[in-house]
Image: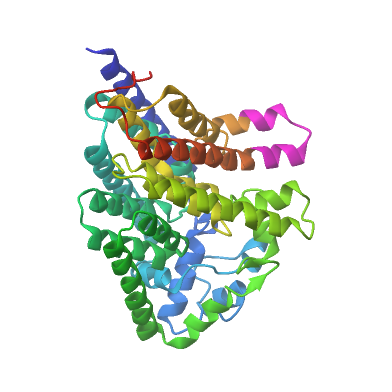
C-alpha cells in the first residue's frame, strides 16, 4: 500500500473520531441551540404574521410563543440580522418541533457538506488518494465543527459557492449568476461576488445575478408584504459608523471585519474608521485589478480570493464564515498536485490552515492549550483564540492574492514547478 494511501486512511480514522467528538459537543436541550434559535424564532414569527424586525428579539420571542425555553442576556439585546429571504427559506423547519427541527437542520448541513466536498474535489481535484486526504483535512477544519456547534448556515453557503464555481468553470454563466444571487439573498454579504464577475468581464453572469436579486426581492415582498422588508432595511441605517451593525457587534474580538481590526489597533479614535475604510477599499481594488488579468481561473483561485475579500469587508463576520474558503485550500492542493504552485504559496496557505486550529470549538484543541498557557490573563485567553480566525483569514487572503497573481502572468510553455510535499 502506498504511503499516500496510508496517510489518507489514517486521516479518515481521525475524521471518524472527530465526528464523535463534535456530536457529543452538540447541545442536548433546546436551551443550548445557539444560532438555531433566532433562525427558528424569526421564521416562526414570519409564518404567524409577526414582523421579526420591528421589535427587539425578546419581544419577538414572546410573541412567537416562547418555542425555545428562555433567552440569555446576550440574546435579549442581540438584533435579528438575518435576511427576510433566509427566514422564508427556513420556514419549513418551523413546522417541526424545535428538537426535531434542530436535528433535521444538522442532518441537512451534513448532506450539504458532503455534496460540496464531492463536487469540489471531483471538479478541481486533486485525484485519487490525495483527494481523499484533502477531503479529510477539510472535515477536520475547525470552522466546520464550529458551524455545527453554533448550528450556523455557512455550510449551505459553501455548497452554493461550490456549485457557482463549477458552473463558471463549465461556462454555464447564467446558472452561476443565479446561484450567487441566491447566496446574496440568503446571507447578504455574498452580493460582493459581483466584483469577481465584473472583474472577469462576465456580463452574462452579472446580468443574471442582478436580475435574480430583483426577482427574489419582489417575491419576498409578495410573500411578506412591505413592512418586514422596510423594517429589515432600517437595520442598514448607519449605527456607530458601520451600516446596520451595533457597536457591540462591530467591536467584538471575534469579528473578522478588516475595518474593525484597524479601529481596534488604533484604539477606536475618530479617524480610525476612515483609515479602516481606506484599507478596505485598497484591498478590494487590488483584488479587482489582479482578478481582471486572469484569463483562465483554472483552480478557482480568483473566485476564492473574492470569497476571502467579501468576508474581510463584511461589517460583521464570525469565525464560522471561514467555512466558505474551503475552495481555496482545495484549489491550492490541486495546483500543487499538477506542479503549478510555488512552495512559498503552499506554505502561506498551510499557515492559514494551522492558524485555524487555534480558533476554538469542538476541534480547536490548540486554542485550549493556548488558554492554559496564558492562564491568569483572562483578557488574553479570550482575545487570542478569537483573533486566530482573523490571522487565518489574513494568511488565506495572502495565499489567494499570490495564487491569483501567478495565474495572471502567462507561464512559460512547458515550465512546471516541482510539487511541494
Residue 147 placement (x, y as % from top left):
46, 48
Q: Relative to 400, is 72 on the left or the right?
A: right
357 in relation to 168, above or below: above
Residue 224 or 12: which is nearer the viewer? Answer: 224
Q: Is residue 279 magenta?
A: no
Residue 196 in view of the camera = yes
Colour scheme employed for the rendering of this structure: rainbow
Q: Relative to 240, is 71 on the left or the right?
A: left
Residue 131 placement (x, y as % from top left):
27, 30
21 in relation to 38, above or below: above
Residue at 55% over, 69% down:
80
Question: Can you say which quadrant of the picture contains the N terminus?
Answer: top left
Residue 148 placement (x, y as % from top left):
44, 48
Which quarter of the picture shows residue 369?
top right
Residue 317 in view of the camera = no
Residue at 21% over, 53% down:
171
Count the labels in the image. 0
Residue at 37% over, 50% down:
158
Residue 320 placement (x, y as % from top left):
49, 48
Which quarter of the picture shows residue 367?
top right
Q: Main secondary structure of the magenta part?
A: helix
Residue 271 or 376: which is nearer the viewer? Answer: 271
Residue at 49% over, 87% down:
227
Question: Can you say which quadrant of the picture contains the C terminus?
Answer: top left
Q: Is residue 375 magenta?
A: yes
341 in relation to 49, above or below: above
Q: Give the extent of the magenta segment.
A: 369-384
Amino acid at each position: 500500500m502506498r504511503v499516500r494511501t496510508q496517510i489518507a486512511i489514517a486521516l479518515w480514522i481521525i475524521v471518524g473520531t472527530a465526528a464523535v467528538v463534535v456530536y457529543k459537543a452538540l447541545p442536548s436541550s433546546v436551551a443550548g441551540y445557539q444560532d438555531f434559535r433566532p433562525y427558528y424564532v424569526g421564521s416562526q414569527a414570519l409564518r404567524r404574521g409577526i414582523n421579526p424586525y420591528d421589535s427587539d428579539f425578546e419581544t419577538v420571542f414572546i410573541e412567537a410563543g416562547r418555542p425555545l425555553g428562555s433567552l440569555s442576556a446576550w440574546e435579549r439585546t442581540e438584533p435579528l440580522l438575518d435576511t427576510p429571504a433566509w427566514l422564508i427559506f427556513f420556514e419549513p423547519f418551523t413546522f417541526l418541533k424545535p428538537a426535531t427541527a434542530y436535528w433535521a437542520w444538522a442532518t441537512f448541513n451534513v448532506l450539504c457538506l458532503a455534496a460540496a466536498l464531492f463536487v469540489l474535489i471531483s471538479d478541481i481535484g486533486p485525484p485519487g488518494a490525495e483527494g481523499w486526504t484533502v477531503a479529510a483535512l477539510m472535515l477536520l477544519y475547525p470552522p466546520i465543527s464550529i458551524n455545527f456547534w453554533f448550528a450556523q448556515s455557512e455550510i449551505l453557503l459553501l455548497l452554493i459557492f461550490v456549485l457557482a464555481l463549477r458552473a463558471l468553470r463549465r461556462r454555464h454563466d447564467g446558472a452561476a449568476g443565479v446561484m450567487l444571487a441566491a447566496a446574496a439573498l440568503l446571507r447578504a454579504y455574498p452580493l460582493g461576488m459581483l466584483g469577481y464577475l465584473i472583474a472577469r468581464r462576465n456580463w452574462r453572469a452579472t446580468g443574471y445575478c442582478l436580475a435574480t436579486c430583483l426577482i427574489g426581492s419582489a417575491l419576498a415582498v409578495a410573500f411578506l408584504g412591505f413592512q418586514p422588508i422596510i423594517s429589515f432595511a432600517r437595520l442598514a441605517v448607519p449605527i456607530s459608523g458601520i451600516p446596520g451593525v451595533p457597536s457591540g457587534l462591530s467591536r467584538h474580538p471575534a469579528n473578522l471585519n478588516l475595518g474593525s481590526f484597524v479601529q481596534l489597533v488604533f484604539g477606536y479614535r475618530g479617524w480610525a474608521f476612515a483609515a479602516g475604510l481606506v484599507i478596505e477599499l485598497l484591498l478590494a481594488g487590488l483584488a479587482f485589478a489582479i482578478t481582471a488579468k486572469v484569463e483562465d481561473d483554472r483552480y478557482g483561485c480568483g473566485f476564492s480570493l473574492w470569497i476571502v475579500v467579501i468576508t474581510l469587508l463584511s461589517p460583521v463576520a464570525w469565525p464560522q464564515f471561514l467555512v466558505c474558503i474551503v475552495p481555496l485550500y482545495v484549489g491550492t492542493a490541486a495546483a500543487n498536485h499538477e506542479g503549478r504552485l510555488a512552495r512559498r504559496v503552499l506554505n502561506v496557505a498551510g499557515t492559514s490552515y494551522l492558524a485555524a486550529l487555534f480558533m476554538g470549538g469542538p476541534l480547536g484543541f490548540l486554542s485550549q492549550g493556548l488558554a492554559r498557557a496564558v492562564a491568569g490573563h483572562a483578557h488574553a485567553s479570550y482575545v487570542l483564540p478569537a483573533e486566530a480566525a482573523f490571522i487565518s483569514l489574513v494568511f488565506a487572503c495572502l495565499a489567494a492574492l499570490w495564487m491569483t497573481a501567478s495565474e495572471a502572468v502567462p507561464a512559460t510553455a512547458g515550465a512546471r514547478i516541482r510539487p511541494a510535499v
